[in-house]
Image (cartoon, coloured by chain):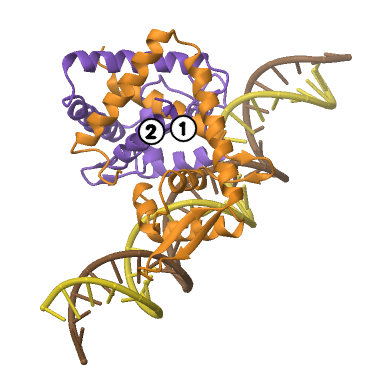
Chain colours: A purple, B orange, C yellow, D brown
Amino acid sequence: MENKRELFQSMVKRFGLLNRNCCTVDDVEISLVQSHILYEIDRREWPSMQQVADALATDLSTFSRQVQSLMKIGLITKVPSSADKRISVLGLTEEGQKVALAIQRDMEAHLEEIFSHMTEFEQDMVLQSIKLLNEAMAKSSVCCKPMY
Amino acid sequence: MENKRELFQSMVKRFGLLNRNCCTVDDVEISLVQSHILYEIDRREWPSMQQVADALATDLSTFSRQVQSLMKIGLITKVPSSADKRISVLGLTEEGQKVALAIQRDMEAHLEEIFSHMTEFEQDMVLQSIKLLNEAMAKSSVCCKPMY
DNA sequence: AGAATAAACTTGCAAATTGCAAGTATTTAT
DNA sequence: ATAAATACTTGCAATTTGCAAGTTTATTCT
């Protein structure tokens, strides 16, 4: 059983495909990266642009433009920090929160559906394993430098 | 412990980052998608363009151009099928095989390094879980229609 | 305090990647 | 024999990317 890579490649690809469904909520349609931006803003407390760009491992210039788009469609806010005027602080608008929540629900539902094909024992084991894997990757030298 | 999505999002992102390192071998430098193309060709027996494009869930036109690039740098071959002249059959050149193998080794090494942070018991459990997960996703209705 | 350095962005490219629509060539169905 | 389908290719046009160079504000150094 020496096909770790195949196993992981397959899994990552499937999740990638799963994510494609993403991102159409009511009449709002956003891209995958935009959904990730909403997600990262949502799970942080008023992050700076740097912080989110780092979390997404994307160039700040690229990120800056994505932020502009998301502001234009009214999903996020960007206000200069009063403490340090170089910094802009990001947040979700009410609409942005709705969209983020809807995507969150969709994702949870998808995961539940996937998990429904396993026994309870298997479900627990899988979750436990993902945790272990994340911890191992966090410890790893080759993996994922720009990670929270 | 109701944060499945966070767990998976984190894992997928880390693997995404892991993959970024990819793809520079000696003096050849290819993109991530190109490495996936090599991978898919490698693991199949003379696949058609359709087959690989499907596996990668990418548009055939996009794929067609990627194939042209990879031919130009001499990593893959494309020959019309004698049985059905509409079909082009893909393969790796000697150089392409070298590159695919090098990437494969890198990936394996990375995975080994990550696994080294776990006990043997945990390693087995994680591998077992990934298998279960893949099977569950294969059964899933929401996930991954275009999958081998 | 004043000058240099750094940090947090923004904007101007130019390249790469994407998908749709429309085309060509070949095969299958009627 | 003609129509329909399949397997691609090419022409767009839009999106996304990162690097380099700029602006503004904050920090550090002397």
Q: Residue at x 60, y 43 (%)?
A: B98
Q: Secondary structure at mark 1?
A: helix
Q: Is residue B30 above or below residue A105?
A: below
Viewer-nearest residue: D3 or C8: D3
Q: What residue type is disc 1 on?
A: Gly
Mark 1 — on which chain does it sit? B
The quadrant where residue A44 appears: top left
Residue C10 in picture, x, y percent from top left: 56, 41
Asked if marks 1 and 2 touch (Cβ < 8 Å), the reply is yes
Horizontal side of B50 relative to A103 (left or right) equals right
Q: What residue type is disc 2 on?
A: Val
Residue D13 in picture, x, y percent from top left: 43, 65
Disc number at residue A12?
Answer: 2
Disc number at residue B16?
Answer: 1
Q: Residues within 10 Å of mark 1 (few under 14, many from 20)?
A: some
Which callout, 1 or 2, points to the residue nearer the camera? 2
